[in-house]
Amino acid sequence: MFFVQTNANTHAKKGGSAMGDAYTVFTISNGEVVGGTEIGIFEKSFAIVIGKDDDNSFSVPASFSGAVPVEGISNEQSQLLFAEIKKTWKGEVKFLARHEATTDGKVIVVIRAKKGYKQFNWVTGACIGWQCRKCSATGTLPCAPKICPRCKAGDPWSSPVLRFANFPGEILARGRVVSANGWVGAGEQIIALVQKGGLFRIGCLYSTSSVDSAHYVCDGIHIAVVPQIQSG
Ligand SMILES: [Zn+2]
């Protein structure tokens, strides 16, 4: 009696590749949320490109850039509105353009933050309290105290600052905007998949007040600006 090993399973897996979820795409720029994002060119291919060098004194601007390639678009298409997330043969993330979203659980967001709030802009999760940079005391007040109640640290380099949760989603690409125009400043730009309920912040990391920042929330279908919850 012979048992013949078949390749049935392998063949079955090679069958038509099922479509994955398609997500709505948003851009945040200058504090505003708009639908879609601009398609650019990166390494001679269509891509969503983030990060740039503001300042001519830097000679290698590309080192600040990040990009996610886009497939499935025509030469005339200037905006990516809906996309599926796929992997290239190298295992890197790419977008496949689609005509509509198929899920209300997550959205793709392109955050084109500029250097702005106190010259340094980073993207984080929501504010979760404060921490002293000298003694690591923490607290949950809506804003950081100017002087640490435990160790009395109160100078600009060690006084308590706000703490932030991790970004509420998967970061697909990172870039930077950098300027040395008189004052060195920097901003972080990211492309991310944000989950429903995800709350994130764009602002200065060493801030004592939420005034120096903007918060956004994802409801699974849109991204909305969160009005200032607290004041410093
Ligand atoms: Zn302290």
Image (tube, grey):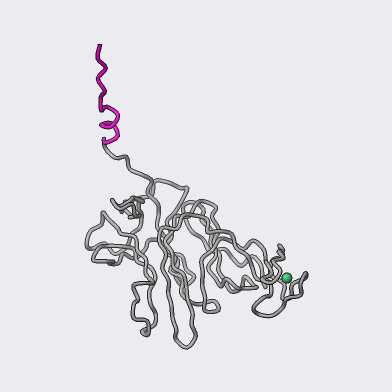
Q: Quadrant of the C terminus?
A: bottom right
Quarter-wise, where is residue 180 in the image? bottom left
Side of 47 where 200 appears, left or right: right
**Is the residue 12 above or below the residue 187 in the image?**
above
Side of 181 where 127 appears, left or right: right
Which residue, as the protein is rendered here, is positioned at the far bottom?
Answer: 182
Q: Position of residue 86 (x, y in %)?
A: 34, 50
Q: Position of residue 223 (x, y in %)?
A: 49, 59
Q: Residue at x 46, y 55 (%)?
A: 170
Q: Quadrant of the N terminus?
A: top left
Side of 1 where 169 appears, left or right: right
Side of 228 where 169 appears, left or right: left
Q: Position of residue 129 (x, y in %)?
A: 67, 63
Which residue, as the protein is rendered here, is positioned at the far left?
Answer: 75
Q: Between residue 82 and residue 10, name the one nearer to us.
A: 10
The image quadrant in which ligand 1 is located: bottom right
Q: Position of residue 188 (x, y in %)?
A: 46, 69
Magenta stretch: residue 11 in it? yes
Q: Between residue 65 and residue 28, name the one nearer to us.
A: 65
Quarter-wise, where is residue 192 in the image? bottom left
Q: Residue at x 36, y 44 (%)?
A: 20
Which residue, as the protein is rendered here, is positioned at the far front?
Answer: 1
Q: State which region is magenta.
A: 1-14
Quarter-wise, where is residue 36 in the image? bottom left
